[in-house]
Amino acid sequence: MMGFLTSIVEEAATGGKGTLAQIGFETPSPALLTAFLLTFGGLTAASAVRTLADAATGKMSASDALRYGSFLGVKPEDVRAAESAASAMKRADDYSLPGRDVAAIEASRAQSAADAVLGKEDDAAVASAAAALRAASDSSVVGGSVSGDSKAASDAAAALKAGAGETVSLSGRRDAVETFAGAGEANARYARRVELDNGRFAMMGFAIACAVEAYSGHGILGQLIDWFKFVGLLGDASGF
């Protein structure tokens, strides 16, 4: 972006010498245009093919995937959430992996509340298993009072209701601080992404401007004037 601005200032100061003319090239030049298109077009095509190949074969790094995703409009937080979910799945004990003990799988399923009911085929067995589950779930309630962790949870809920609107807990204050800090971090990421995109488009515009100069002999300012004349913003009375 700085190079783009510098080239425009120098073009205005030198009376219309474009970027290529400033570094000593004669324009317009069909040979220069051909060499320019072959060089940058070939490099762009080769890089695009390599990027697609890396993505298809899984060789692309996570940082590169985030950068390409950001340029294409994919939100980085969505990618990070997907990666976190994938990592959690890999860390979890997956019974679908090969080499698992079938007996261990069946033993684990036998301890599952869902499989205790869904694994039955007879209606009577299903009703019996459901009744056993209900009895087990009600065993924590004794004499109308809640015992163990359930009682602690109930007491905590009652205390929160009684003091609602009066005080803010330390955890609540911490959540507020984290919210503001997260907002600042999100704004910083957004600003950085905007600047990166601006820089990328500036480089693309600079390359296109050089190619047009090699074809027409007009620098950036001359190309803007040509465009304004083409769309009718500048007429014969403008002097251009």
Image: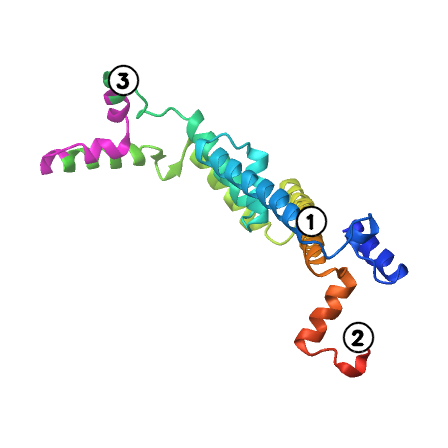
User: Which of marks 2 and 1 precedes in the sequence?
Assistant: 1
Q: Which span is picked out in magenta? A: 106-125
User: Which of marks 2 and 3 precedes in the sequence?
Assistant: 3
Task: Give the residue pinned by disc 1.
Answer: 32
Tell me: residue 10, above or below residue 104.
below
Magenta highlight: main SS: helix
Gap in angstroms between the C-alphas marked 1 and 2: 27 Å
Residue type (three-letter) at the residue carrying disc 1:
Leu
Q: Which mark is residue 104?
A: 3
Gap in angstroms between the C-alphas marked 3 and 2: 85 Å
Residue type (three-letter) at the residue carrying disc 3:
Ala
Q: Is residue 72 visible?
A: yes
Foreground tag (1 vs 2): 1
Task: Give the residue pinned by disc 2.
Answer: 240
Relative placement, left or right, of 17 versus 137 is right
Q: Which residue lies at the image location 69% right of the left edge and 49% below the top edge?
A: 32
Q: Which residue lies at the image location 59% right of the left edge and 52% below the top edge?
A: 164
Tell me: residue 187, above or below residue 11.
above
Depth check, front residue: 45 or 38? 38
Q: Are the residues tagged 3 and 2 within 8 Å (C-beta)? A: no
Q: Which residue lies at the image location 59% right of the left edge and 35% below the top edge?
A: 63
Q: Position of residue 39 (x, y in %)?
A: 63, 42
Foreground tag (3 vs 2): 2
Residue type (three-letter) at the residue carrying disc 2:
Phe
114 in the magenta segment? yes
Q: Which residue lies at the image location 52% right of the left edge and 45% below the top edge?
A: 78
Q: Position of residue 102 (x, y in %)?
A: 24, 18
Q: Is label 2 in a helix, a strand or a loop?
A: loop
